[in-house]
Structure formats: structure tokens, C-alpha cells
């Protein structure tokens, strides 16, 4: 093996060694032989050798095939083949076997669900397993292979975690392809065929199935498969009318009043050759009922059939009354429609309770199941967050903490003790100390130590009140209102800019200080006392009207202060300018986004969410449209302006122009 060996030659050698190793169940033989080649050549050749050997084993028993897949799994764990090979082999096996053998072989896949969820296999095999199961479902008939289809779906539910978005109907879509076809001769009824074989306890309970009731009954399936049609005004009236006829028939036609004779089973075979009945106690489940008009009366006598229709009503009503994230604004029931739904829901539960056997227990069970569906819907509305294990319970406190808590004095006793000394207890040592520093807190706030207002001369002449004040001009204005007689003097010259006004006031105060200094040299201390008295008198003569003028002046000068420094940028969106996108704009911009993935990544979508849009929608325009619609619904910062800004940064010129030109 030291020389360069071709792929085909290496593949044949591996197949021979694989046959010997599998026959003797000696995986060490295969492992030691494969180490002579490099990893890339070894894995690719070994993968093909496993598939070639499988062709020789397809005619063997299922147990042999299961052992062969287990042998491949052990090889994966020894890094001899790629991690996807066990599922690839299973896919080849299911493609080559008949459906009956596939159903037996699928039990091996179900029992190995824990193996497929291992870290080695899950990421590599999840897409292959999903594709394999979908291929099987396409081969199966949901009406004839119902159990096998259900097993496949249950396996996928166990295999994928709850938060796996690919397995969820996130956007609340309906299976619109499930069309119920019906029709027939409107002159014949089942009564003509089976009237002689029906035994009725009371003629008043006899129900005649005419063509009108037959058409109304099966027309309801269109509403059950697409509940959104109920939001249409005309369709809602049709639904209410048809429901009234059908539910009235259920109410008047009691199942206890009819006893079918055994001979009816043979007559039923002659009515419809497609129906096969067995005269035994085994109950059969039909995924989809037949719609022949001659069968309707017998179907109405079947409790399972009646329960199926009534549960369809409850599911439909729950959707109409629930808050679903992807419903449009127009999809909302009016008050009279809500009342009708509530009344009809009560009637449906009553009919379920009257349907044997064990009607009341069955109705309660259905009610509990639908209640759990509300939690499921709420979880989807919240964005399907991952389920987390509950936090472990907090450990019990040690005995010392418990004893210390028991020694604590009652709060009432502490408050009573403090009130006796004219003090306050605030529940905290620091707060209690601060609160009791002075008996009268308001008086403490008025002491000289709490007066931090500077003198007018020192503040204005230091440069803080002039041009250097900047954003602190409001301090100079407030100080002028308190200490200067010039602030409230009437003048014909309007105030222009705040810095100019403060410069004028600084000049006036400078002249006054200079004059006071001259008078101090001549008159001595008497003039100083007079000046202080004048300032104090001016301060005391401030009336409520002047204080109110002070507030108005402050508000006006705030605008003046901000005027020269503020810059208006019309390009920045304000709160009032933020707009949501319209349907026309959404359609226009979606048609111009071939590279919508770049925009989705820029808007914060994760790779798995982008992959979801690719798998759910067939065209690029539909993917871009739904991606943008979800962004506008969920993101708090979503707006037309932010979308334009993002697309301009990505140089999506055509999309920007389409958004700007549409309204």
C-alpha cells in the first residue's frame, strides 16, 4: 500500500476486506487495513465500498441489513467512514425494498433515535434523515398506509428538538390541497335503499337526508381546510347558514334512536363497492371519509364520524378566536360574530357530550387538548424560544441564619421605641441616621450651610456669565433674576442673542462695581451697608408675578440659547417621521431584491432563518417579501427610512429607487 493506488483499485480492496470483517464481525481487521491510506482517500473509497457491499446484501433478511448498518455505525465512531454513511445506507435500503418490508425495517430507525441524536450524527445526518422520511411519505398512501405515515411523523417529532424551525408551521399555513370532492344524483337518497332495514324507536327522530342537506354538509369542509375564508363577509354568511342546518340535524337525530341490523352491512357493500366492512369487533380508522350521498345517513349514525365533524368545528373556532402572529389586521371577528362562535361552541360541546359512548368524558378530554393548543400557539407567537431546564431549587438555609432570623425584634416594637424619643425609624441604619440628624428637615435645608448660591459680582466678573458661559448661561439668568435690579427693567430694545445680552449685563455690573469702589473710598463703610440693604430690599420685593416672569424668561431664553448652536439635519428621521411600509411599497421593493440574502443578514436574520425562507417559498420575490414583512412586524426599529439606509449601504440602487417611487 506504499505506492499510489487508484480509487477503483482501493475501493475493490476495501470491499473484499469489508466482506471478511463483516462476516467475522471483526471491525479491527477493517480498521488496521484502512490505516495504510491517507484520510481523504480512505473515507471516500470506504464509503463507496460500504454501498457496493450493500448491493450484495439486499436480498438477505432484515436482521442482516440491520447488523450491516450497525457495523457501519461502529466504523463511523472509529473515523473510518463519513458520519452520513449509516443514513445513506438506510436510504438505499428503503429505495430497494417493498413497502411491506420498509415498514418492518423502519422499526430499526425508530429504535435507534438516540443514536441519530448523538453529536457525531445529528448535524451531519439530520437533513439526510428528513429527506429519507419524506421520500417514504411520498410513496405511501395516507388513506391506506395511515399507521406507517403516522409512525414516520412521530419519529421526526422525536428526532428533532422542539425549537427546530424546519419542523414547525411558523407562518400558520393551511393544507389547501386537501380538497373534498362530492356530488351525485339529487333525486336519490339512502332512504330508498335502507328504509326497510332501519328500526326507529320514534318516527319524530327520523331524519330525511335530502340533496340540499347533503351539499351543505360537505361544503363545510372548504371552511375547515381554509379557516381564513370565514373572515370574508359573504363566506361567513354561507358558513353560518350551512352550520345551522348541519348542527340542527345533529341535535334532532339522536344516535340512541337507531339500531342497525346485521344485514345492513351486506347492503352497504352493494351501495358502494369501494367500502369494505368486516363483521368483527375490531374498529377501523379512515383517514378520509367517502362522500357518496347514499352513505350520509349511515355516516350520521356513526359516533366516530359525528365526533370527527364536531371536533373540526372546535378547531376552527379556536383559530378564529385566537391571536395568531401572522394574521392580517382585517382577519378579526366582529362582536356579533364572536357571540355566535361562543354560542355554537357551547352547542358543539353539548352534542359531543350526548354522543355515545362516554360522551361527557370525551368532551372533557377534547377541551383539555385544545387548552394545551393555546400554550403551543402562544409559544409560536413568542418566536419559538428554546426550552430550558428549570433551575435547581435554592438550597435550604443553614441553621445559623434561621436562628438569627428568629432573634429579630418585631418592627412594631422598634417603631414604638423610636417614636417615644421623637425620632423616625426608616428600616435601614444609614437612612435612619440621616433622617434623624435634625428634628426639622425643612429648617435644616434653609440653614446658611445649605446656601450654595454665589454672589452676582463674583460669578459675572469671573467670566462664567459672559461669552465663556456656553451651555451654563441659564445659571447667569437665574442669578440675575435673584440678585440684579436690571433683569426686570422694561426696555424697548429686544433681546437678540443670549451671549450678547449677558455681555451687556457684565459691562453694567462692572461699571456698578467700579462706582461702588470709588464711593467706598469717600463714604466709607456706610455706603457699603446701603448697597447691601438695597440688594436685600430688591430681593425681598420680588413678587409672585416677577417669579412667574422669571419662569417665562427662562423658557424664552432657553430657545435663544440653543438657537445659534443648534443645527437642523433634515436627513435624520425623527419619531414623527418614522413610517411603516405599505403593501404597494413592499411589493415594489421585493421585486427588485435578487440579493435579498445580504439584506436579510444585515437586518439581523440568522442563517437557519434565511434557509427557512428558501425552503418555504419558491421564488426570490416571495422570499424577499416575507422576509421584509416579518422584519416590519417583529423589529422595533423597523421603518421605511431604516430600510432605505440599509439598502443604500449595500448599494441596492434599484430597490431603493423602487421604494422611493412607490406610495
Image (cartoon, rainbow, N blue to C red):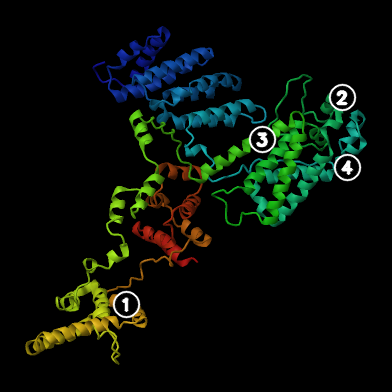
Label 3 vs 2, first from the N-terminus: 2
- Circle 3 packing at 10 Å, graded few (<14), some (14-19), many (20+), is some
Label 3 vs 4, first from the N-terminus: 4
Which x, y percent locates residue 139? 59, 29
Q: Nearer the viewer, residue 604 or 551?
A: 551
| Labelled disc at residue 366 | 3
**Dot 2: what SS?**
loop
Relative to 13, does residue 557 appear above or below in the rendering? Answer: below
On the image, numbered disc 1 is attached to which residue? 554
On the image, numbered disc 2 is attached to which residue? 261
Label 2 vs 1, first from the N-terminus: 2
**CA distance for labels 3 and 1:** 69 Å
On the image, numbered disc 4 is attached to which residue? 187
Which dot, 3 or 4, sits closer to the camera? 3
**CA distance for labels 2 and 1:** 98 Å
Label 3 vs 1, first from the N-terminus: 3
| Labelled disc at residue 231 | none
**CA distance for labels 3 and 2:** 31 Å
**CA distance for labels 4 and 1:** 91 Å
Amino acid at each position: 500500500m506504499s505506492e499510489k493506488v487508484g480509487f477503483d483499485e482501493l475501493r475493490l480492496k476495501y470491499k473484499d476486506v469489508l466482506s471478511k470483517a463483516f462476516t467475522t464481525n471483526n471491525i479491527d481487521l477493517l480498521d488496521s487495513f484502512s490505516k495504510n491510506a491517507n484520510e481523504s482517500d480512505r473515507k471516500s473509497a470506504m464509503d463507496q465500498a460500504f454501498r457496493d457491499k450493500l448491493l450484495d446484501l439486499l436480498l438477505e433478511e432484515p436482521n442482516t441489513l440491520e447488523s450491516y448498518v450497525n457495523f457501519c455505525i461502529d466504523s463511523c465512531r472509529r473515523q473510518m467512514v463519513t458520519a452520513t454513511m449509516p443514513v445513506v445506507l438506510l436510504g438505499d435500503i428503503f429505495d430497494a425494498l417493498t413497502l411491506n418490508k420498509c415498514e418492518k425495517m423502519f422499526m430499526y430507525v425508530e429504535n435507534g433515535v438516540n443514536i441519530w441524536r448523538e453529536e457525531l450524527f445529528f448535524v451531519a445526518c439530520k437533513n439526510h434523515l428528513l429527506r429519507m422520511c419524506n421520500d417514504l411519505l411520498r410513496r405511501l398512501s395516507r388513506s391506506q398506509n395511515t399507521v406507517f405515515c403516522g409512525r414516520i411523523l412521530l419519529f421526526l417529532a422525536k428526532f428533532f428538538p422542539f425549537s427546530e424551525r424546519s419542523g414547525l408551521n411558523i407562518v400558520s399555513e393551511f393544507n389547501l390541497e386537501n380538497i373534498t370532492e362530492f356530488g351525485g344524483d339529487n333525486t336519490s337518497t339512502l332512504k330508498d335503499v335502507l328504509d326497510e332495514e332501519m328500526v326507529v324507536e320514534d318516527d319524530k327522530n327520523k331524519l330525511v337526508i335530502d340533496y340540499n342537506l347533503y351539499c351543505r354538509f360537505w361544503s363545510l369542509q372548504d371552511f375547515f381546510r381554509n379557516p381564513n375564508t370565514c373572515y370574508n363577509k359573504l363566506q361567513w354568511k354561507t358558513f353560518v347558514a350551512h352550520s345551522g342546518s348541519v348542527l340542527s340535524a345533529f341535535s334532532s337525530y339522536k344516535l340512541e334512536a337507531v339500531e342497525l341490523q346485521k344485514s345492513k352491512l351486506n347492503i352497504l357493500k352493494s351501495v358502494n363497492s369501494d367500502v369494505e366492512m368486516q363483521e368483527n369487533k375490531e374498529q377501523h380508522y379512515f383517514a378520509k371519509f367517502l362522500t357518496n350521498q347514499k352513505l350520509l345517513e349511515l355516516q350520521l349514525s356513526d359516533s366516530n364520524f359525528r365526533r370527527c365533524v364536531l371536533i373540526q368545528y372546535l378547531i376552527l373556532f379556536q383559530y378564529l378566536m385566537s391571536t395568531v402572529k401572522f394574521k392580517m389586521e382585517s382577519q378579526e371577528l366582529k362582536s356579533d360574530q364572536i357571540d355566535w362562535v361562543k354560542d355554537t361552541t357551547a352547542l358543539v360541546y353539548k352534542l359531543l357530550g350526548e354522543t355515545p359512548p362516554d360522551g361527557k368524558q370525551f368532551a372533557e378530554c377534547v377541551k383539555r387538548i385544545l387548552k394545551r393548543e393555546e400554550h403551543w400557539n402562544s409559544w409560536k407567537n413568542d418566536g419559538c424560544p428554546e426550552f430550558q431546564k428549570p433551575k435547581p431549587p435554592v438550597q435550604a438555609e443553614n441553621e445559623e441564619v434561621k436562628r438569627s432570623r428568629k432573634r429579630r425584634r418585631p418592627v412594631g416594637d422598634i417603631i414604638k421605641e423610636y417614636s417615644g424619643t421623637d425620632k423616625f425609624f426608616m428600616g435601614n441604619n444609614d437612612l435612619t441616621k440621616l433622617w434623624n440628624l435634625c428634628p426639622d428637615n425643612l429648617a435644616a435645608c434653609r440653614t446658611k450651610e445649605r446656601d450654595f448660591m454665589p454672589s452676582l459680582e463674583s460669578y459675572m466678573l469671573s467670566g462664567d456669565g459672559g461669552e465663556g458661559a456656553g451651555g451654563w448661561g441659564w445659571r447667569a439668568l437665574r442669578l440675575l433674576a435673584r440678585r440684579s435690579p436690571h433683569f426686570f427693567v422694561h426696555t424697548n430694545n429686544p433681546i437678540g442673542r443670549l451671549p450678547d445680552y449677558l455681555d451687556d449685563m457684565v459691562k453694567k455690573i462692572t461699571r456698578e462695581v467700579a462706582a461702588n469702589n470709588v464711593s467706598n473710598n469717600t463714604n466709607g463703610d456706610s455706603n457699603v451697608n446701603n448697597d447691601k440693604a438695597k440688594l436685600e430690599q430688591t430681593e425681598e420685593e420680588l413678587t409672585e408675578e416677577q417669579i412667574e416672569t422669571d419662569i417665562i424668561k427662562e423658557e424664552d431664553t432657553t430657545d435663544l440659547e440653543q438657537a445659534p448652536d443648534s443645527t437642523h439635519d433634515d436627513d435624520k428621521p425623527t419619531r414623527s417621521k418614522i413610517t411603516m411600509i405599505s403593501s404597494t411599497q413592499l411589493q415594489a421593493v421585493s421585486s427588485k431584491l435578487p440579493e435579498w440574502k445580504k439584506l436579510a443578514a444585515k437586518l439581523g436574520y440568522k442563517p437557519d432563518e434565511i434557509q427557512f425562507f428558501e425552503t418555504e417559498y419558491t421564488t426570490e420575490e416571495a422570499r424577499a417579501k416575507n422576509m421584509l414583512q416579518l422584519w416590519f412586524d417583529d423589529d422595533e426599529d423597523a421603518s421605511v427610512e431604516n430600510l432605505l439606509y440599509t439598502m443604500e449601504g449595500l448599494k441596492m440602487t434599484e430597490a431603493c429607487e423602487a421604494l422611493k417611487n412607490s406610495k
